[in-house]
Amino acid sequence: MLKLSKYKVTNFRSVMDSGWIDCDDVTTLVGINEAGKSNLLLALWKFNPARTEGENKIDALHDMPRHMYTQWEDIPGKITFATARFEIDDIIQNKISSLTGCEKSMINIVEISRQYDEKYCVLFPEYSQDNTILAKAISDIVNNAKTEIAVLNEVTKAEAGIKDKVIESIDKIIAYLSEKEHLSASDKKDISSMYPKGLKKSATSVIYPKFEELKSAITKGFSPITGSKPSEYKEVKELILSEMPSFVYYSNYGNLDAEIYLPHAVKLLNGEKVPGFDNDAKVRTLRVLFDFVNLNPEEVLELGSDPLKTERVRTITKEINRYNNQTQTTEDEKIVEITPDEEEIKEAERNKEARAIKLDSAASRLTTSFGDWWKQGDYSFDFKADGDYFKIWVSDKTRPAKIELHKRSTGLQWFLSFYLVFLVERQDAHKGAILLLDEAGLHLHPMAQKDLTIFFNGLATDNQIIHTTHSPFLVDTSHVDRVKVVYSNSDGYTVASSDLRAAEDKQNSNSIYPVHAALGLSVSDILINGCQAIIVEGTSDQYYLNAIKLHLISNGKLKPKQEMLFIPSGGCKSKSVSAIISIVSGKNQELPYIVFDSDANGESAKKQLLSDIYAQATDRLIDMKEITNIDNSEIEDLIPFELMNRQLNKWFGSLDDDFESDSSKAIIPQIKNFAQDNNVDLPDGWKVILAESVKRDLQKPKTTISDQTMKVWENLFGKFT
């Protein structure tokens, strides 16, 4: 299985280079209208669509940036429009390692890009080929082979002299290797030139096969510096592309009609055209409705057929004149009803009873399953068939009278259609697909939009989701790190960033409004629902403490009586902290906990608060040094180094010297100093990037934390509770 970890869009419509967009189980793209959010989804859809048809086909004329089309139209194979990185699971890693001999650590990430000529390029960004190998490794192979061959005998006269030639060759190789400490690719050629020429193979020979084994072993020993890159293996590329998840894009969910004409439904679901009905989205929703409740519209139609029979009766009328001569003959046909017999009437009654039971059963299933997702009312669905019509009625506790579906709220219609499409279609064509949702839930009430975020989390157990939104109610404040801001840069091109302050210029100042509003709503939730607010200095601190909280809860080490919400204050300046305190203190005026770094700024802010409003609440100001016993420590000093090292290796992995931390000292200054000493420019917002990486790894089921670290974490959270 491949899991999308990040992607970027280039050279596509309004996007020249979006920058890497980190992806989680659910990823939210926010931004103003015309920022290019939809283009970031459309490019990914065309990258590998579940079904290649219509709009999702690559169309250079309309998809290339307009101002570059004449320059690029003749070189589509050189223009990449989307690149995605995927994490590779153990099963596929083992297959690739078996095919190539590569270490699994070098093939756990794959990068796939697609060009306008529809071809894919595959590479492994963490794969690196050594320039040399140790001579001792090859020397051991050769010496072991000599020992084995020395005790063997020539079997037939046809191979007379083969042993001497082989031993002589081996001795030359051993002498050559004895003067080397490291070997390069050119040494492989020199060793190959020492192999004996003209060896005769005998069917019963034991020496010849042994020497061939030695040659193969030497070749394999040199493979780290002479072998092909894993991406150059045809079998590897075919395997990766076959395992790559498809993408499914939705912007129209096709709300259901309350009354469905069954003869039309039968034709539409059989792929036939119906005059005046060209809404493909509605046909899709109609199809999944009948699939989900296990009804066949043709059967529903037949079970309700009337038992009356009719037949055409032909009559001939002859006109006779007064002379008794026939003057005119008239032929006529008319339909005559034939009264059904008793058995036919009973059969029709049984059929209609069976239809009613089937409809009741189907409606009951929809009511039960839909209720598990929709939290905005206790809805009950009722299916009725009246002649050729299938009708959907809805009632709830507050309005027990049954009302046609189309007369209920647009939000209810949308959510029902959305629910059906995803639960049914993801089981087949969309299984394992990545879902791209453009402006989902626009017609839903704000509280229903909040439920939609829960719905997304449920879907994401099987399907990663990337969605765009303007609504603060669709921003999950428990996972602000999943939110990316989309905006236009100074040249007018679309870019995306995990740094939510990246779009703070005048033109894009409203891009991040949904996140600001969502955080404000979360604060309101605290006041209304009694959540526990804990103020921290920055966004990275929020990520770390949320991750630690979830890990402690999942391991039964923490059972909070209230939801804990970590609120970043944008630093430790007393003014910004005081403003947040005034908001989150609530009606009971209980002061929130504040976690400070133990640096000079943190100590100063803490001292000022202690002399003022926290004079009688000293236990609510927590200095990190109290927890870590490390001078100048920050939240990062709570985190085991091995959780940080994966991300640090991406920044420092190319250096000759490895970064080694001193656990007795604060980690952040060590990282800064090492980067400075080695002329490494850490990326903007690197502390947030590091925190996101740690949070993702800490949430993985296989991640284990030492008892000592768990006790430190329990100690900190014990202060909050």
Image (cartoon, grey):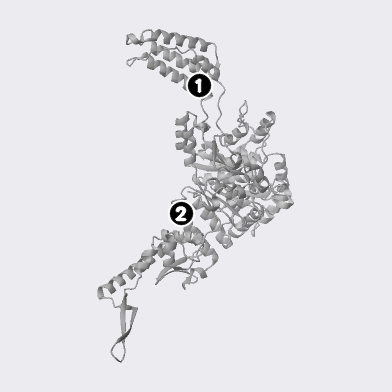
In terms of sequence position, does the residue under pointer 1 or pointer 2 come before the other?
1
* Residue 18 on image: x %, y %: 64, 45
Q: Residue at x 53, y 55 (%)?
A: 454
Q: Is residue 378 visible?
A: yes
Q: Which residue is mark 2?
A: 425
Write down the residue under mark 1.
222
Quadrant in the rendering for residue 661 = top right
Residue drawn at point x = 55 percent, y = 45 percent: 47
Identify residue type, mark 1. Answer: Phe
How far apart are the two marked residues, 1 and 2, measured between alpha carbons? 49 Å
Q: Residues within 10 Å of mark 1 (few under 14, many from 20)?
A: many
Visible residue check, residue 715: no
Q: Residue at x 49, y 18 (%)?
A: 137
- Describe residue 60's horizontal placement relative to residue 217 as left or right: right
The residue that appears at 54% across and 64% down in the rendered structure is 411
76 up-or-down from 376: above or below = above
